[in-house]
Image (spheres, rainbow, N blue to C red):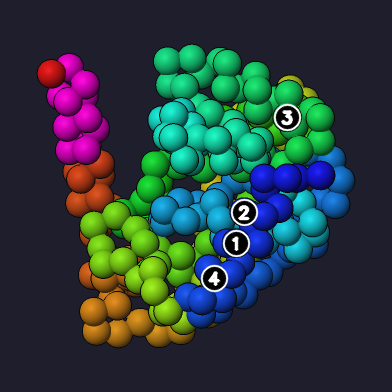
Amino acid sequence: MEPVYAPVIAFTKGVFRAQGLKFTIVGADNVPRTGGAVMAINHTSYFDFTYAGLAAQTNHRYVRFMAKKSIFEHRIAGPLMRGMGHIPVDRANGAGSYREALAALKSGEIVGVFPEATMSRSFELKEFKSGAARMARDARVPLLPTTLWGAHRVWTKDAPKHRGRSRIPIFVEIGEPIVVERGSNVDEATARLKAAMQEQLDRQQAAYPRLTGADLRYLPARLGGTAPTVEEAAAADLHDMTRTKDEFNS
């Protein structure tokens, strides 16, 4: 029984219908019907976790997402996050978060992670952290390469929001599970994961309806769009990090 998660999903699906979002989900059968798995997801939107979780629901699975600890401290979001079994990430105690995620995987849960750690302003894949591959190896569960395209048009950083009835197409693809054998090199496994996700993302971008005019803001510069370049996005990320540290130290 999921007394919190189930009604939240029902409410969220209602919101999606009201927004007119058009989902195309590929590879849902790659989500195991039972047992643990690490769902590794690219990150371009504030709502990525909801769209990836929707894909897992095709096989009646719930995803326990790893999210920053501050969300769990919010008076409204916090109780919901805990009720849904999500996992707080404390940067000051990363080992504790890792142990909690590992325990969830070993008990048969799907744990959702964003290997890029932060949102990509360029909409290109950023460098991946090795945590997803490490968890899959240590828990002896499959790694699910999961890519989203179109989600960033709903709500992303530094761009207009479209949270009303937008009818935006959102593509979700879950690739074939990657097995990270015991004793495997996690850096090599992470490279395999990123390559698989890049291949999926390229396929989604090629199939996505053509963007024109102001919507070119949501297309990577590499593909002729006006989104920030990888270098511009990195500079903006650095500025955010510096500002956060300055505020913390003030």
The answer to whether residue 92 of the structure is visible from this angle is yes
Quarter of the figure with residue 150: bottom left
* Nearer mark to the viewer, of 2 and 3: 2
| Residue shown at the point (26%, 67%) measured from the top left | 160
Q: Earlier in the sequence, mark 3 or mark 4?
A: 4
Q: Earlier in the sequence, mark 2 or mark 3?
A: 2
State how far apart marks 3 and 4 are (Cα).
28 Å
Is 75 rendered above or below residue 178?
above
Residue 107, position as x, y percentages in the image = 81, 30
Task: Kindly identify which residue carries mark 3.
Answer: 104
* Label ID, residue 16: 4
Is 36 rendered above or below residue 94?
below
Task: Kindly identify which residue carries mark 2.
Answer: 8
Q: Which of 31 and 46 is in front in this view?
A: 46
**Which secondary structure lies at badge 4?**
helix
Residue 127, position as x, y percentages in the image = 42, 41
